[in-house]
Amino acid sequence: MTFSHPSFGALDPDRIIIFDTTLRDGEQSPGFSMNLTEKLRMAEALAELGVDVLEAGFPIASPGDFESVESIARTIKGPVICGLARTGGRDDIARAGEAIRPAERRRIHNFISTSPLHMKYKLRMEPETVLQAVIDGNTLARDYTDDVEWSAEDGSRTDPDFLCRCVEVAIKAGATTINIPDTVGYALPEDIARIFTMLRERVPGAEKVIFSAHNHNDLGLAVANTIAAIRAGVRQVECTINGIGERAGNAALEEIVMAIRTRHDALAWHSGIETPKILRTSKLLSTITGFDVQPNKAIVGRNAFAHESGIHQDGVLKNAATYEIMTPESVGWTKSSLVMGKHSGRAAFRDKLRALGYGEIGDNQLNDAFRRFKDLADRKKVVYDDDLVALVDDEVMRGHDRIRFLSLDVHTGSKAKPRAELELEIDGAAQSAVATGDGPVDATFNAIRDLFAHDAVLRLYSVGAVTEGTDAQARVTVRLEENGKMVDGQGADTDTIVASARAYVHALNKLLVKRARTEPKALSA
Ligand code: KIV
Ligand code: ZN
């Protein structure tokens, strides 16, 4: 059977639509908020990766959310751009409609809870009122776009008969995609299969829409549940890079895509994802959010293709297929290569950045990044692609920051009390401070606090290396907490203390973005 869809037209029945919600469900989880520049950079990377639908945010949630959805709709070409709205909120749907208007292809995704528990305690609404809201919300959404998705929040814990009635009226009112989320990550694969099989068999009009799965990972089953949904006839899967998302996260895009690609013998579907770009996109997200994936994370973890035991290494050397079910190259792992030396010019530097996927860097950012590259090449014998990526991501992402690192001089040793002389640019004006501390990092952080007073508490400080060797760049993560809000910042430099200062400043900038956003509980989806 061939589907005809307002955004995709006649769809190949074996094609799985990849709906990415990294910038919505992913971004709304604690510590993962991004500013506009970061969201645009991430959206560009997701478009290059080949996602079909990009859920850019929840426009009614705050003016900042509206602005980022609208900017993504205006600038990002390729995917359908989607904005989230509550089914019951006329203003929600109008805001989402306005925000996505500039996009070539646009979708409104409206949702309302349908489980007894959510209707009674969260919505305080009777089932019949919810049913009417589904009709009204989807009818209204169709005034803004022909591509309308409706989600039954907590769908996996919804009474089957009521779910069928809701889906039926949503389709009649104009929804073209029906999403059944396992909002709390409670379902088992057989539950998911049963729900979709039932809906496709029982609901009149089911053959005219695309069914979609949205699984959370509270029991570690999000990807397994998504595969079960595909087997039960779902043709859209909602997922995030690195599996980020509310609580334990969402189904990981890279895992779903590589499961159907690697096990094509059992899963005869395909996606439009350019898999060699997966790792690059995963790393970009880690740089932006400050959260690295765990080393053993499937596909993108640092150990995903590492072979430690002698027996395994021997096998891989003889024939990689002995212990590798997919090639590292197929998801973007390559050996770090020497990029350039200190004599390389600006044009070669720009070419290299293009090759690494940085097409749209502005001249000012390029100049700043080039200056930092020259400085790095002076201090470090070998500059690898990974060094360059760390440095450029650091520079590009900081374009709109209120606080910028300028310079740092630290005096430390076993005799005198460590002392830091720090220069920051705050709202465009250079300012400096001198502070002492219990160690060089403490002195540096005290200097930052002198220059920009704040109450945030340091919750985590960790140091890793971008590449190998004693001259490797340090990558520092700093976690700050203010009024229960947590942010992580990252910084990279050959000098660990400079990397620490950059990471702290990054975290502070993220905190400022968070403070500016209104995030009432009721508005988080
Ligand atoms: O998990 C969920 O139910 C959601 C909906 C808004 C789709 O994120
Ligand atoms: Zn969700």
Image (cartoon, grey):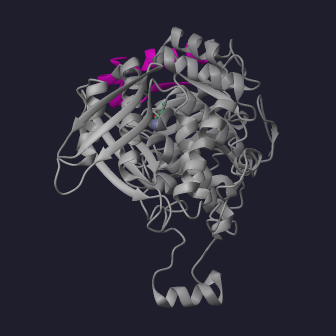
Main secondary structure found in the magenta portion? helix
Horizontal and vertical percent for residue 393? Answer: 56, 43
Decide which of 92, 440 is in the foreground and name it. 440
Q: Residue furthest right?
A: 10
Q: Is residue 130 visible?
A: yes
**What percent of the width, then of the height, locates residue 233?**
65, 49
Residue 486, image x and y in percent? 31, 35
Q: Residue at x 43, y 32 (%)?
A: 28
Question: Is 421 located above or below residue 284 in the figure?
Answer: above
Residue range in magenta is: 110-138
Horizontally, is 258 left or right of 424 in the view? right
Q: Quadrant of residue 53?
A: top right
Which residue is drawn at the image coordinates 77% and 24% (left, top)? 104
Does the magenta run of residues contain 115?
yes
Residue drawn where x is 50% and y is 79% of the image: 307
In the rendered image, the quadrant that contains the C terminus is top left
Classify 204 as above or below 249.
Answer: above
* Residue visible at 67% across and 53% down in the picture: 277
Q: Nearer the viewer, residue 232 or 514?
A: 514
Residue sitting farthest toward the front: 415
Q: Tell which of 460 and 57 is nearer to you.
A: 460
The image shows residue 206 at horizontal and vertical percentages of 67, 35
Residue 424, by quadrant, is top left
- Please say whether residue 111 is one of the residues in the magenta stretch: yes
Residue 167 vs 429, above or below: the answer is: below
Is there any visible trace of residue 198 in the rendered image?
no
